[in-house]
Amino acid sequence: MAADQAALPASHRLWQTASAAGSGLINRQGEDMKSIGGWLFIFGIGSFLLNMFGMEFKLLSWIDNWGPTVGIAIRAGLIVVGAALWLLGRKQEAAAPAAEG
């Protein structure tokens, strides 16, 4: 079998190694999705709250460049996308142990 793998291109060997890791890779992706989703959600909610007091995160100071309506839409988008990513990541993490067993 080692001879067969040596004959394969590097990309195929890498794919086999990654697929052998299997659920560990999926679980890591779920953690990453939860992390990114959580941060997007926090920045969206925080941006809404800070905007009520006339403040904004420096990272998101560009949001109101196109007017307050677009700013609200972008903030809502951050919240919705963040929540969706977090929930999908949570679902992937829950599915990973089931795939192992």
Image (tube, helix red, strand yellow):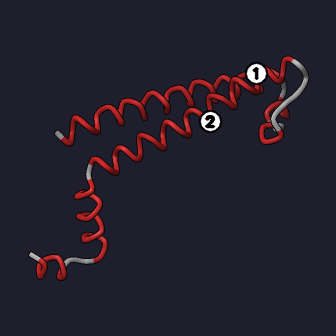
Vertical comparison of 16 with 33: above or below: below
Looking at the image, is mark 2 or mark 1 nearer the viewer?
2
Secondary structure of the residue carrying numbered label 1: helix
Q: Position of residue 96 (x, y in %)?
A: 29, 39
Q: Position of residue 27 (x, y in %)?
A: 36, 43
Q: Earlier in the sequence, mark 2 or mark 1?
A: 2
Q: Residue at x 74, y 26 (%)?
A: 46
Q: Amino acid at mark 1?
A: Phe
Count every numbered label the image shows and give the total. Answer: 2
Q: Nearer the viewer, residue 62 or 50?
A: 50
Q: Residue at x 76, y 27 (%)?
A: 47
| 97 horizontally vs 53: left or right | left
Q: Quadrant of residue 4?
A: bottom left
Look at the image and tell me in which quarter the C terminus lies.
top left
Secondary structure of the residue carrying numbered label 2: helix
Q: Residue at x 20, y 42 (%)?
A: 100
- Label 2 vs label 1: CA separation? 14 Å
| 101 horizontally vs 32: left or right | left
Q: Amino acid at mark 2?
A: Trp
| 27 horizontally vs 60: left or right | left
Vertical comparison of 50 with 18: above or below: above
Q: Residue at x 69, y 27 (%)?
A: 44
Q: Quadrant of residue 3?
A: bottom left
Q: Which residue is mark 1?
A: 48
Q: Residues within 10 Å of mark 1 (few under 14, many from 20)?
A: some
| 20 horizontally vs 67: left or right | left
Q: Which residue is mark 2?
A: 39
Q: Residues within 10 Å of mark 2 (few under 14, many from 20)?
A: some
Q: Position of residue 74 (x, y in %)?
A: 70, 28
Look at the image and tell me in which quarter the N terminus lies.
bottom left
